[in-house]
Image (spheres, rainbow, N blue to C red):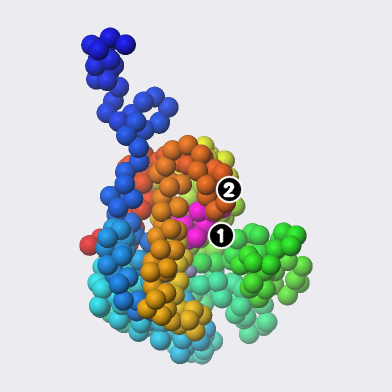
């Protein structure tokens, strides 16, 4: 090609782009994009981890769970506060609220005091876990659903205070479906208590999802974050339907990127671009004493390596080009534009959740 024609073409093409959304310059470096993992449970002090996070431009929001056990919830919150106190913006946290003695008089006031205190100690938001809808019962023996009027004053209190609720309600739909033949290693194979296929004694998936939708309907002023893509991870169309219907709804990815990677890439890409202000990144990485053995010093490098592998694998899917391996499967990477990546990874969390904007 004539050198002058080549130069002219170069100037004609917008910087970094060629038609068809393919980037000429490649995705931004992993470290160049600020990452807030909105869904983590790191309740162990791991020397050296803070440095790893800083080097990789990464912050983890620690989420407290299991609120039916008053001792557990108190302990989790103390650890989360301590991590926040010691590491500041590297470890913001979500408190939860007690779910014991819920039918005793003054329950809502007790929760409001609890929440106010947790916010005072630095909690940026609060979490509601799947035990509501799948474990707790009403006095009449029915399942206690998350849209029960019992919780209305609590949701109102959060809305009034401008604090977000991140809610993990229900499970992926596959929890109600049979395991794949020969499966002995998946989450539901190893956690049969949360695997509901063929069980009569558990509420249906649809019932819990409908109860969640009813909260969104009843509390339009509550900033509501559906953890794990709002348990609609198997179908971006179902998520889009709720995002359209409920302006106060947003979702977080907590370990559900693998479900997106099973859907057509063009469709997922379009979804993430259309709802670029409503989706936030998360992994659900966890180190919880009692569930995980404390890491020995010689195990730390391997832990750091595996954590970074998770983040890089996801990043490769969202930012990369062409066919990639995701979790042993060949999928087309999404090649999201930089501004969409920036919102997904940190911008939305900063904008939506006061306390993460530092
Ligand atoms: Zn989690």
Cβ atoms under marks 1 and 2 closer than 8 Å: no
The residue depicted at 25 percent of the width and 78 percent of the height is 85
Q: Look at the image and say whether residue 258 sits in the magenta stretch.
A: yes
Residue 347, compared with residue 122, is above or below; it is: above
Residue 289, compared with residue 258, is above or below; it is: below
Q: In this view, does 179 lie to the left or right of 77?
A: right
- Measured Cα–Cα span from mark 1 to mark 2: 22 Å
The residue depicted at 51 percent of the width and 80 percent of the height is 291
Q: Which of 37 and 169 is in front in this view?
A: 37
Q: In this view, does 222 lie to the left or right of 91?
A: right
Residue 302, compared with residue 289, is above or below; it is: above
Question: Where's residue 187, x and y in %?
Answer: 61, 67
Numbered disc 1: secondary structure? loop
Numbered disc 2: secondary structure? strand
* The magenta segment: 251-262
Q: In this view, does 231 lie to the left or right of 319?
A: right
Q: Does the residue labelled 1 lie within 8 Å of ligand 1?
A: no
Mark 1 lies on residue? 231
Q: How many marks on residues? A: 2
Residue 71, compared with residue 170, is above or below; it is: below
Q: Of the numbered discs in the image, which one, if any, rests on residue 329?
A: 2
Q: Of the numbered discs in the image, which one, if any, rests on residue 249?
A: none
Question: Where's residue 161, x and y in %?
Answer: 32, 70
Classify the position of the N terminus by image quarter.
top left
Question: Where's residue 87, x and y in %?
Answer: 26, 73
Classify the position of the C terminus by image quarter.
bottom left
Q: Earlier in the sequence, mark 1 or mark 2?
A: 1
């Amino acid at each position: 090609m004539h050198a002058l024609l080549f130069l002219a073409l170069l100037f004609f093409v917008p910087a970094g782009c060629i038609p068809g959304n393919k980037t000429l310059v490649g995705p931004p470096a992993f470290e160049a994009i600020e990452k807030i993992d909105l869904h983590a449970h790191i309740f162990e002090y791991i020397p050296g981890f803070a440095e790893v996070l800083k080097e990789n431009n990464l912050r983890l929001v620690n989420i407290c769970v299991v609120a039916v056990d008053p001792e557990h919830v108190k302990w989790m919150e103390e650890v989360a506060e301590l991590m926040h106190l010691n590491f500041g913006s590297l470890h913001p946290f979500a408190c939860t609220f007690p779910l014991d003695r819920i039918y005793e008089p003054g329950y809502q006031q007790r929760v409001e005091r609890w929440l106010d205190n947790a916010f005072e100690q630095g909690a940026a938001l609060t979490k509601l876990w799947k035990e509501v809808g799948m474990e707790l019962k009403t006095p009449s023996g029915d399942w206690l659903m998350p849209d029960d009027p019992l919780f209305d004053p609590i949701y109102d209190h959060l809305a009034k205070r401008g604090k977000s609720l991140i809610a993990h309600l229900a499970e992926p739909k596959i929890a109600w479906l049979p395991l794949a033949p020969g499966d002995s290693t998946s989450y539901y194979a190893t956690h049969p208590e949360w695997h509901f296929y063929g069980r009569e004694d558990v509420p249906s998936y649809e019932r819990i999802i409908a109860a969640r939708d009813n909260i969104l309907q009843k509390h339009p002023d509550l900033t509501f974050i559906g953890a794990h893509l709002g348990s609609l991870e198997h179908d971006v169309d179902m998520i889009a339907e709720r995002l359209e219907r409920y302006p106060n709804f947003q979702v977080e990815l907590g370990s559900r990127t693998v479900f997106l990677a099973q859907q057509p890439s063009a469709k997922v890409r379009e979804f993430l671009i259309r709802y670029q202000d409503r989706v936030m990144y998360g992994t659900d990485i966890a180190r919880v004493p009692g569930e995980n053995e404390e890491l020995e010093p010689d195990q730390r490098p391997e832990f750091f390596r595996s954590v970074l592998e998770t983040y890089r694998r996801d990043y490769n899917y969202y930012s990369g080009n062409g066919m990639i391996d995701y979790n042993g499967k060949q999928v087309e990477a999404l090649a999201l534009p930089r501004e969409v990546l920036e919102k997904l990874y940190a911008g939305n969390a900063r904008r939506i959740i006061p306390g993460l904007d530092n």
